Amino acid sequence: MDGEIFRRDFTEYLEEAVGHENALIALSALRSPSSASVRLNPHKNGASFPCGTEAVPWNGYGLMLESRPSFTLDPYLHAGGYYVQDSSSMFVGHVLRQLLPDLADRIGRPVLALDLCAAPGGKATDAAASLRQVFGDSFLLVANEVVRQRAAVLADNAAVWGDPCVMVTSSDPERFLMLPETFDIIICDVPCSGEGMFRKDPKALEQWSPETVSLCEARQRRIVADAWESLASGGILLYSTCTFNTRENDGNVEWICSSLGGTPIDVPGTDGFAGVLKTRFGHLLVPGLVKGEGQYCAAIRKKGEAQGREKPQARKRSGGAGGRCQDSPGKRRGEDAQLLKLAGSLFSSTMRIFSGKDGRVRAIPEKIAGSAGTIASALNVLSAGCEAGMLKGRDFVPSSDLALSLALSPGAFPSAELDRQTALSYLHKDAISLPDAPRGFVRVCYGGLGLGFVKNLGSRCNNLHPASRRIRMDITAE
């Protein structure tokens, strides 16, 4: 970015939010290249990087990278070993982690969480990792995205991350009115004017105007208002944007509290980070003051006492199509027995197995299966738990998602460790051979992490990697 590229009204908004001196630093930083950072999956070990790294101060699994590698050509990424996420965006996860211990003390049942605007999945996978560290399998995270194409990307990223306690939905925020007093936590990373992304997305700079800010401010209020009823009394809303101006940030938090009935939370453990600005109700991260992009986050508690209920009660739907997560007895007793056998042989924890009309077999932790079914009855579900595979007569064909899942029992399938080039060939959906592996379905791994399955025929393997996820670039590009 060169020259006088920023509108005067934008610089005035920025100065109002961060002060004159900080605004000068930010404007200079917005002309420089963006940083590169990743967040490791704490439940999948093994990822490494060819460049120098530096710890992200507010995330023990976050790393700043000295240079940007070709992530597409790294098998660890495809195995869910890490997620490419801006370091500033990770601050929302930090705020969440400070609040989870209190939630654990107050609620004696599985925790229900919602990421309302979740695509492409950075904050959702961060939240899933943190919830798992505190609650094990005793949580359900609904990751929602209203735009169907973006929701499909979200579902893929959730599957690769591998947590079986995640449900991906694609529903308009107003549909959550059918789930009153349901969620203990709602992460609301609302669409915004994108000021914090100017150096990553030139279109955000071109499209910015005071009118855009006003439109975003109003839309953000509508989104939060639609979701608010589904937040349980005493529950927590994490409100975040990737913008700087006070209207979309502190101004909207003030509106939420005064109009909807919330109280700002002074979150412990969030102050003292170099460059992170404390605002009236939350925290603001600004390029130049921190190494990442722009991010705002505030926490709000809904008035009332937390409820220790067993499961949510959804209102009846007024119509429309939607996926359902429910038990399916199968057409034959033989299929029932097959599903029960799978439940005992595939997973390292107690899972509820169900099959759909398309023959696909899914599994979800037993602790949250009831709540998942109730929530799914109100929403359009793209995926829930882990897609295990398909029943084809007497045969069970495992899904690639199963190889990536944290719930898979280590001894469920024979495995084969691949070198980097063979792993890339597999991910490119090329033919590979495993002469030393047993015949049948084999889980292929890289660095100990599952990538997917092949059916080993001896002289060759049928590559079962999903075509939608295959690497399309030249795998010899480096």
Image (spheres, rainbow, N blue to C red):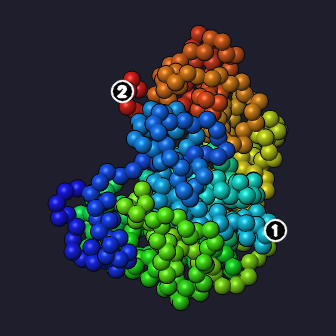
**Relative depth, front residue between 183 and 353:** 183
The residue singled out by tag 1 in the image is: 108
Q: Position of residue 57 (x, y in %)?
A: 54, 56
The earlier-in-sequence mark between 1 and 2 is: 1
- The alpha-carbon separation of the residues under discs 1 and 2 comes to 52 Å
**Label 1 vs label 2, nearer the camera:** 2
- Outermost residue toward the left in this view: 3
Write the residue at 37% across / 61% down: 288
- Can you say whether 314 is above or below 67 in the image? below
Please tell me in which quadrant of the rendered image residue 319 appears. bottom right
Left-right relation of 101 to 261? right
The residue singled out by tag 2 in the image is: 477
Residue type (three-letter) at the residue carrying disc 1? Gly
- For residue 376, which numbered disc appears in the image? none
**Relative depth, front residue between 78 and 152:** 78
Q: Position of residue 146 (x, y in %)?
A: 48, 62
Dot 1: element: loop
Q: Is residue 453 visible?
A: no
**Relative depth, front residue between 426 and 278:** 278
- Can you say whether 233 is above or below 109 in the image? below
- Can you say whether 262 is above or below 474 in the image? below
Residue type (three-letter) at the residue carrying disc 2? Ala
Q: Residues within 10 Å of mark 1 (few under 14, many from 20)?
A: few
Left-right relation of 345 to 261? right
Dot 2: element: loop
**Relative depth, front residue between 107 and 16:** 16
Q: Is residue 370 visible?
A: yes
Disc 1 + disc 2, Cβ < 8 Å: no
Looking at the rendered image, the quarter that the C terminus falls into is: top left
